[in-house]
Image: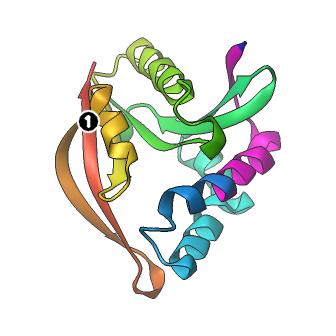
């Protein structure tokens, strides 16, 4: 049985574990190991996740199969005070990708967005990430390119995607 549950700070350890398993599989051919390690530490520290939840209005979800967590997402309604639900993070364990968990999670977020009177879903994806095809298959369109500078000269080279609801 597949379930989606709201995550709390007590779930940050499992969120971090999924990120640390998923990111190398997703980004090792795109980013250097140093940048990968830096970004994981920056985005998934206890402090960062707590800030996302408590100060930036991010909501976290876990997707479970038979009580085993196989992925997570975070999102924010009314992103930049617009009628947009922004998906900040969505990762499914590599060994469970392609089994529909990502689609189920995205459909759930879409329903929450509609309940919150939003007109669009929005997210960024690395321009070289094969997940781009997944997002396009479920109705997202590229609306912009965005380069985000990080510390140490690292760069996030993203597409901005949007899906009308």
Q: Is residue 71 above or below residue 17?
A: above
What is the total number of numbered labels drawn onto the structure image?
1
Q: Position of residue 101 (x, y in %)?
A: 57, 26
Q: Which residues are magenta?
A: 2-20
Nearest the eye: 73 or 102:
102
Which residue: 42% across, 20% down? Answer: 110
Q: Residue placed farthest to the bottom in the image?
A: 152
Residue 82 in sight in this render: no
Decide: few, some or many residues near mark 1? Use Cα within 10 Å; few <14, some 14-19, many ≥20.
many
Q: Position of residue 74 (x, y in %)?
A: 55, 39
Q: Which quarter of the image is occupied by the C terminus?
A: top left
Residue 108 in sight in this render: yes
Q: Mark 1 sits on what residue? A: 162
- Magenta stretch containing residue 9, yes or no? yes
Q: Residue placed farthest to the left in the image?
A: 143
Residue 1 image-quadrant placement: top right
Please give left or right for residue 134 compared with residue 67 in the image.
Answer: left
Residue 44 image-quadrant placement: bottom right
Q: Position of residue 64 (x, y in %)?
A: 71, 26
Q: Position of residue 85 (x, y in %)?
A: 39, 31
Q: Is residue 2 above or below residue 70?
A: above
Which residue: 30% across, 29% down? Answer: 137
- Magenta stretch containing residue 60, yes or no? no
Magenta stretch mostly in which secondary structure? helix
Which residue: 75% across, 36% down? Answer: 8
Nearest the eye: 44 or 36:
36
């Amino acid at each position: 049985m597949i379930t989606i549950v709201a995550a709390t700070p007590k779930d940050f350890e499992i969120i971090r574990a999924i990120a640390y398993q998923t990111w190398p599989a997703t980004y090792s051919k795109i980013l250097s190991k140093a940048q990968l390690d830096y970004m994981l530490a920056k985005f998934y520290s206890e402090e960062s996740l707590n800030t996302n939840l408590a100060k930036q209005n991010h909501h976290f979800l876990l997707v479970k199969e038979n009580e085993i967590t196989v992925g997570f997402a975070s999102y924010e309604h009314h992103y930049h005070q617009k009628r947009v639900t922004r998906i900040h993070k969505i990762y499914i364990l590599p060994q469970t990708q392609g089994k529909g968990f990502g689609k189920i999670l995205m459909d759930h977020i879409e329903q929450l967005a509609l309940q919150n009177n939003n007109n669009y879903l929005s997210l960024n994806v690395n321009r070289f990430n094969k997940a781009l095809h997944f997002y396009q298959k479920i109705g997202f369109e590229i609306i912009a390119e965005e380069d985000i500078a990080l510390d140490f000269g690292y760069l996030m080279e993203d597409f901005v995607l949007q899906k009308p609801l």
